[in-house]
Amino acid sequence: MLGHGQNQGHLHRRTHTERQQQRPRPKPETGLDPGGERKDGGLKTAGRLNAGAMREYKVVVLGSGGVGKSALTVQFVTGSFIEKYDPTIEDFYRKEIEVDSSPSVLEILDTAGTEQFASMRDLYIKNGQGFILVYSLVNQQSFQDIKPMRDQIIRVKRYERVPMILVGNKVDLEGEREVSSGEGKALADEWNCPFMETSAKNKGSVDELFAEIVRQMNYASAPNGDDQCCSSCVIL
């Protein structure tokens, strides 16, 4: 995503496949068990899952520029940390996972955080089923910026119980913290949604984050799911 001082004119759309053609990706450590599956914090990533039983979900990652949206997404999908990243308008990823014995395919949309492309968020939100709202805990302004994005989700979706998670990223920079855990939890309590603090750099709670958004979407898609969705606050 766009960092401070980067040229907004260089933004462009890419799919994950196109990006792999542009730049070689480090291979993630698979951590496969004898059954060919990887298990992390309640989330099981499988190379092949039963396609007939899979649910497909669209997850949208939102937040202002430089908070680590791309780093979180790439860490989850590839198991690698990319410190410097080419800015994009949007970036698509697909990943097959299994959470709580339920297989799913995630389509993850990593969006631009710049105000220049804020008008495009309505379309992202309209098509999205789950939302990860990211701020940097070393940047108080990014915490303020996330609030109107949540308001935009509610406006477009026209109901409040939308699967979403509030995420304070860059917990590895604890010495530079500007947003306390208490502030993040209080805002999540106000929104009635889960709250997590993550580190894209050392993969702290990254897998748990995506497992939790899948749980939220599973709850929402179940009978009477609106009564369960976002009903508790999770802090990791």
Image (tube, rainbow, N blue to C red):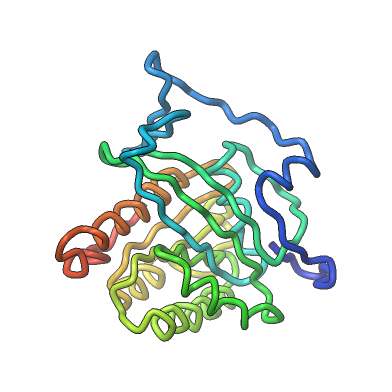
The residue under the point 45% across, 21% down is 32
- Image: 69 above or below 35: below
Residue 23 or residue 181, whichever sits in front? 23
The residue under the point 40% across, 57% down is 196
The residue under the point 44% across, 29% down is 48
> Which x, y percent locates residue 224?
15, 65
Q: Say which quarter of the image contains residue 139.
A: bottom right
- Image: 171 above or below 40: below
The residue under the point 56% across, 64% down is 136
> Which x, y percent locates residue 100?
26, 40
How many numbered circles does the render carry? Answer: 0
> Which x, y percent locates residue 68?
61, 58
Residue extending farthest to the front is 52
Q: Is residue 226 left or right of residue 9?
A: left
Residue 188 or residue 92, whichever sits in front? 92
**Which quarter of the rendering shows the N terminus?**
bottom right
Residue 138 or residue 65, whichever sits in front? 65
Q: Is residue 147 left or right of residue 42?
A: right
> Which x, y percent locates residue 219?
24, 58
Q: Say which quarter of the image contains residue 80.
A: top right
Q: Is residue 180 left or right of residue 172?
A: left
Residue 167 or residue 76, whichever sits in front? 76
- Image: 122 above or below 80: below
Q: Say which quarter of the image contains residue 17.
A: top right
